Amino acid sequence: MSTEESDPTNSVVSMLMNPSRSMANWYACLGMLGIFLAILNITGNIHPNYHLSWGGLFTFEATNAAFEPKSSSIQFVLSDVIFIGLCAGISGIGFRTINNGELGLAAWFKGMFANDTWPALVDPDNGGWNKLFGAWSLLLGIVFYFFYGIMYTGWIDIGVYSMSVSLIAFGLALLMAANAPEGNDNLD
């Protein structure tokens, strides 16, 4: 048995608890989105007719029903506490990794708005057409999700997720293609 196989630093748990910089970005953003959705669920603004049970949703209704009738008052149940705790833990791990980086948390928040992606929205010379269409697709996916959620209380609608995720993923793929270094080898 080699020493690499028994080394606990190479375990899956260690990898999940100490994510890379790019994975920490995903942890932080998804955790914050989860906390936002949990708050909307508690206040009754996540769906026009139903209150969501996170326990029922994640167990595919094995433990309880995923959708319960909505009441006029605030509904706060145990699955909300557990879900908020999980999302806060995921965000905390992400923010810990980001904060341990060179620039820290303040630079990360600033980098969300002041980066080389958003100027490409208006100038194809700033990164090419891939970056222009990628930036627009990313922006449209985010705006569509928040617009539909605010206007129609459809924060957990499958169609809204499908449309938003498709636009965001396509935008990220185009941005990665625009930022990829030029190849040295000719494939002819």
Image (cartoon, grey):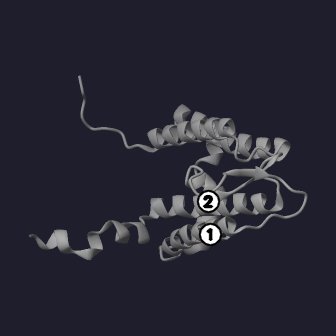
Of residue 165 and residue 107, the one placed in the foreground of this image is 165
- Which of pointers 1 and 2 indicates the residue nearer the eye? 2
Real-space CA distance between mark 1 and mark 2, rounded to the nearest whole angstrom: 9 Å
Residue 152 found in image quarter: top right
Quarter in which the N terminus is drawn: bottom left
Badge 2 element: helix
| Residue 78 drawn at (x, y percent) | 68, 69
Q: Is residue 155 above or below residue 97?
A: above
Q: Is residue 150 above or below residue 4?
A: above
Q: Are marks 1 and 2 in contact (CB under 8 Å)?
A: yes
User: Which residue is under mark 2?
Assistant: 55
Left or right: residue 60 compared with residue 152: left
Left or right: residue 141 compared with residue 154: left
Q: Which residue is drawn at 77% across and 67% down?
A: 76
| Residue 18 drawn at (x, y percent) | 41, 71
| Residue type at the position of mark 1 | Ile
Taking the view exactly as shown, the residue that stands out farthest to the top is 188
Q: Which residue is drawn at 60% across and 66% down?
A: 87
Q: Residues within 10 Å of mark 1 (few under 14, many from 20)?
A: few
| Residue 13 drawn at (x, y percent) | 37, 69
Q: Residue 82 carries which label?
A: 1
Q: Which residue is drawn at 73% across and 40% down?
A: 144
Q: Residues within 10 Å of mark 2 (few under 14, many from 20)?
A: many
Q: Residue 70 carries which label?
A: none
Badge 1 element: helix
Q: Is residue 188 visible?
A: yes
Q: How many labels does the image show?
A: 2
Residue 75 found in image quarter: bottom right
| Residue type at the position of mark 2 | Gly
| Residue 48 drawn at (x, y percent) | 83, 46
Taking the view exactly as shown, the residue that stands out farthest to the left is 1
